[in-house]
Every structure is written in structure tokens, then in C-alpha cells.
Amino acid sequence: MKTPILLTTLIVMSASLSSPVTAGLTESLYGKMPDGREVKIYTLTNSSGMEAKVTEYGAILVSLKVPDKDGKPADVTHGYDTLEGWLGNSSYFGASVGRFGNRIANGKFTLDGKEYTLLTNNDPGGMPCALHGGKEGFCKKLWKGEAVSADGASGVKLSYVSADGEEGYPGELSVEVTYTLTEKNELVWEAKATTKAPTVLNIVHHTYWNLSGDPDKSINDHELTLYAANYLPTNAGMIPTGEKAPVAGTPLDFTKAHVIGERIDADFEALKFGGGYDHAWVLDGTGDGDLVKAARLRDPKSGRVMTLATNQPAVQFYGGNFLDGTTTGKGGVKYQHRTALCLETENWPDAPNNPKAPTAILRPGETYHHKMVHAFSAE
């Protein structure tokens, strides 16, 4: 999902020489914010040749290198080479978005009898909504990074305190996002948060994937499985109607692996509303907070496979419909239509306004917890 965001000017500094922090992890200076604050970038590695780079700005996954079936590693994400590029990131490449990822209709919700008004920064179908936290959501904030390790895995924990009233959301919120790279070739993204007053929350990870390792190639040749028998129909503004609908017999049925591009131009209302795939699937599973299978993505040529597990009730599959060749990314590549996709595990879009959705309310004394496990292999 894409919405314009004002570009910010940055004075870029050359990264310092990396200095060891702990086994499998280094930190470097990535650049400076316009106000002079330093921004670090962390590099995580494992013994299988995987490498993840994470920056304090936006709690962003800058890159992820994954070996193919011949053992050759390549970056499988879209993004930018410099911090300056990330400050102009209008597509949410690699970002940790919040407070509420995805859409809230009309930028309004009611909590404990009080109506709150948010900035509306997206209007699909001419219907305004608040998208991904607003004008300056979590993906536009400078977080504080800290190297961590557990069970032989390298990681970085990023912390941010969101003030009461930020972007219109109530309650001072303390947030931690942790990235961990394991020896099992898993990239784990985990978000936790506590609040001083009742609020609504849906922190979402928004990496764009292309498992071919070639950012010029379409993801329409990738094979996708979604472990979901139902999806959420929407109106023209991409806001769920409140009902679940079966995927059986529709081009949204990925309960068995399908090539993404084979049905993308089908005469189906949901695809017309989204300009392709841009919908939430309701995951099969117990819904008790345990990890459940969300998706399996495979690039037949490179052999790379990514399986995704989560403790959230839904996954948004976005097929890169708004990439249009105007964004210059890593290595000067202009990202073309559908050259990457997102698999965003999450609560239901517009959950605060939908009594049929799982609750999005976080109260004092409770801890919000969202976990995603991306497991990589090659075949």
C-alpha cells in the first residue's frame, strides 16, 4: 500500500568502520538526521550466509541477503542504499508501521465512549482513511537501537516512546521492536508495547519481498500459499465490510500454491478495488496467541522459499500494484510494477470500527505482542 509522504532533507555522513558488538552483529553510523541526531545501522549475520541490515530510523529492515539453491546470496528486499533515500520512503519499504498499520475508515474511531480523529493520508476510491499511522507514523521516527543476543542468535532491539496524542492516538505508548537472525535461517520480527491510557494498536512489518534477488523481475512468477480459507471483502475504499467470505472458487484462493500472476487480471470485484491483490486474509488457526502458519512463498528459478508464521489473526497480501517505475531504489534501480510483494501479518484493517474484528484495544497493565517468523530455505 502506498501513499505520498513529504520528503525530508538529510545531510548524509559516510558510515564509520563497523565495530564488533557481539557474535554475528556489528553496528555502524548510517548518517545524521537534519537536526543532527546520529542514526545507526546494525548488520546481523549467521553461519549460513544470511545477512540482515536494520536501521534505527523507522525500525526498518534495510536489506536481507539469502542464499539461493546454488548457495549464492542476494538481497531479496526493495529499499534504498542511503539514509537519505529512506527519509523519502513513501512506499513503507521495510518499515515498522504504527500506531495502527493498515487503514482506519475516515480517520475516526470511538474508544470508551470518546471519538478520536486522526489525520487522513490515503483515499482509495475517493474514500479517505488513516493509513499506517498517519503523516509521521512509527516508520518516520528515530528509534533507539541496542544489540541483543539469545540462544546463539544475533539481534537488535529498537525502542521508541510515542507521546499521548501523537497523530491523534490516545495514551503514552512504549514500544520495542526486535529483529533476530537465527542459525535456522529465520528472521524474527517481534513488537511489544505498553500504554499509560487505553488506546488502539496494530504494529505491522512492511518489507517488500522479491525472492529472485533481481529487483527488475516481476513477482508474478512467484508461487504463493496462504493458510486462510476466508478473506475480508472491502468497499471501494479498501475498508472491510465487516464480514468474512470464503476464498473457495475465487482468484483469492491460495489455500494451495498458485502462481501469483495467473489470476491477477480476473474479472473479480476485490481485484478491481485493489488494482490487484491488496487484501486481508483471515488465517486458519486457534487464535489463542500461538504461532500459526500464514504463508509460503517460492521463487521457482532461484529456489528460494520463505515460510511465514505469526501470532496475529490476519495477513495482508499486497502485490506491489502501486510500484510504477518512478521510485529509484538500491543500485539506481527504478522499481517497476509488481516487482515486489508484502505479506503483513496484522489485526483486521479498521478493527477499531468493526465489532466483528478481534479487539485492537490495549489498556494499561496489558502488553501488546506481535511476532512474525520468516523462515528461509532453498530447493
Image (spheres, helix red, strand yellow):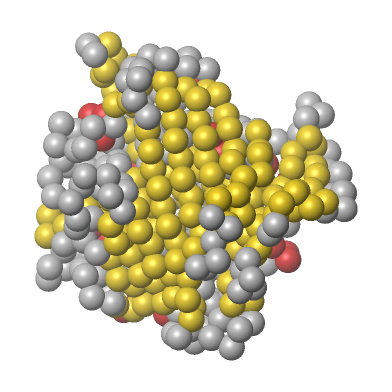
Image vertical order of residue 39 relative to residue 49, above or below: above
Say if 165 sits above or below 8 in the image: above
Say which residue appears at 42% left-offset and 38% top-offset.
203
Q: In the rendered image, is residue 295 in sight?
A: yes
Q: Quadrant of residue 275?
A: bottom left
In the displayed orientation, state which residue is furthest to the top.
114
Residue occupying the point 29% across, 77% down: 258
Name the image quarter holding residue 195: top left
The residue closer to the viewer here, 211 or 183, is 183
Identify which residue, 98 or 220, lies in the foreground: 98
The x, y position of residue 241, in whole percent, is 17, 42
Residue at the image position 32 percent from the left and 36 percent from the top: 127
Quadrant showing the C terminus? bottom left
Q: Is residue 98 above or below residue 60?
A: above
From the top left corner, tell me how far across and down residue 163 is, in percent: 52, 17
In this rendering, position of residue 315 left or right of residue 28: left
State whether residue 167 appears in this view.
no
Q: Position of residue 358 (x, y in %)?
A: 21, 37
Q: Quadrant of residue 248?
A: bottom left
Give left or right: position of 49 versus 304: right
How many numbered discs? 0
Left or right side of 37 for 168:
left
Image coordinates for residue 218, horizontal then vertical, percent: 49, 74
State left or right for residue 326 relative to residue 200: right
